[in-house]
Amino acid sequence: MKIRFLTSLAAAAIMTATAGSALAGGKQINGAGATFPYPIYAKWAEAYQKVTGVKLNYQSIGSGGGIKQIKAKTVDFGASDAPLKPEELDKYGLMQWPQIMGGVVPVVNLPGIKSNELRLSSKVLAGIFLGKITMWNDPAIAADNKGVKLPAKKITVVHRADGSGTTYIFSNYLAKVSPEWKEKVGFGKALSWPAGIGGKGNEGVASYVSRVPGGIGYVEYAYALQKHMTTAMLQNHDGNYVAPTAENFMAAAAGADWKNAKGYYLLLTNQPGEKSWPITGASFILVYKKADKPGQTAEVLKFFDWAYHKGGKMALDLAYVPMPEKVVTMVENAWKANIKGPDGKAVWTDDMIQK
């Protein structure tokens, strides 16, 4: 299964060279953006093509790149983990919706330390990425890790070098828990980092951390699983140390109030709850409300509808959190009301729903 999954990722990456081209004998949907959901999009794409013959060409280039490409109309949809604010959606005539939820996790390269053996408080995590805590045996780290043999090794911070929704989620969390981070760095898709080296995409960060002893970075959880990386426990909103698991991502997502989130603009970091994973987020899809090519936009909606209704188990297998059924219904009603062709007719109709 692991070999097949990695093969599908490689095949999807090769397909990016043909973005925008028509494939003989079948339809193709072109999208670009966030690396956070790439593992599940690749898995959905493989399954969807078997069922429908429709191919998904998804360029995993980061949320910033996906937003740029959809604004330039060079793709059928954009994907971003950093939701656009309602005023920006209105300015460009775009609609966004949450497609999947998951967790951003700190990963470390510390010989002798097993996954979830290391505990990091919110204060310590901010201190590391601020460049103030520079050694793994620092007293601030040791205080929360009694009985763990911490090496006298330099900490190497690895962060994203590209415009990234994963960075947006991670830095939004740090800005909520650390006044110093909020004042000096803030949050966004691209930052002026106080310390560390940059890697491109979740893939790049995972690769750097795996190669650098003493490294620490942040990636979407599926990448940590795929690369057999060492994850750390984090202190959550309620003060508990929790491990990154699908159950704890779900706990954080449980209180998400999508109904009252205008334009679905909602961030899920530092949610209360005994088990809530503190760096949880959603990944969003962007399309134009006025569809110049309604047939192509309909194919996009069919794919993501299929993913909503048929892709839940695949998502859970990779530790993502599927959207609740009531949110799916709300989103699909919004498709019907807001996305229209040049003739003013709705691109999406109820009879297209996969049941």
Image: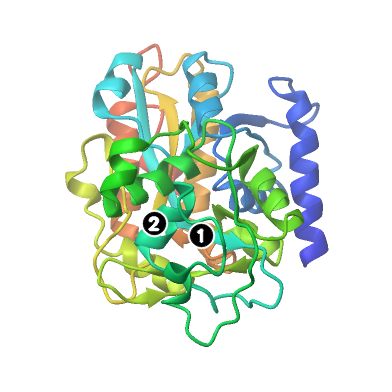
Amino acid type shown at disc 2: Met
Colour convention: rainbow
Q: Residue at x 40, y 52 (%)?
A: 281
Q: Residues within 10 Å of mark 1 (few under 14, many from 20)?
A: many
The residue most toward the left is 260
Q: Secondary structure at mark 2?
A: loop
Find the distance from the CA under tag 2 to the CA under tag 1: 20 Å
Q: Is residue 74 above or below residue 352?
A: above
Residue 234 showing in the rendered view: yes
Q: Quadrant of residue 274?
A: bottom left
Q: Secondary structure at mark 1?
A: strand
Give the quadrant of the N terminus.
bottom right
> Residue 219: percent from the left, percent from the top?
56, 53
Task: Give the number of the mark in front: 2 or 1.
Answer: 1
Which residue is more in the foreground, 324 or 37? 37
Read off the residue under disc 2: 323
Which residue is more in the foreground, 218 or 297? 218
Q: Residues within 10 Å of mark 2 (few under 14, many from 20)?
A: some
Which residue is more in the foreground, 154 or 161? 154
Q: Residue at x 55, y 54 (%)?
A: 220
Q: Residue at x 49, y 44 (%)?
A: 166
Direction from residue 254 to residue 67 in the image, left or right: right
> Residue 194: percent from the left, percent from the top?
48, 38
> Residue 246: percent from the left, percent from the top?
47, 70
Q: Earlier in the sequence, mark 2 or mark 1?
A: 1
Amino acid type shown at disc 1: Val
> Residue 93: percent from the left, percent from the top?
34, 17
Looking at the rendered structure, which numbered label has been put on residue 203?
A: none
Residue 278 showing in the rendered view: no
Read off the residue under disc 1: 105
Direction from residue 345 to residue 99 in the image, left or right: right
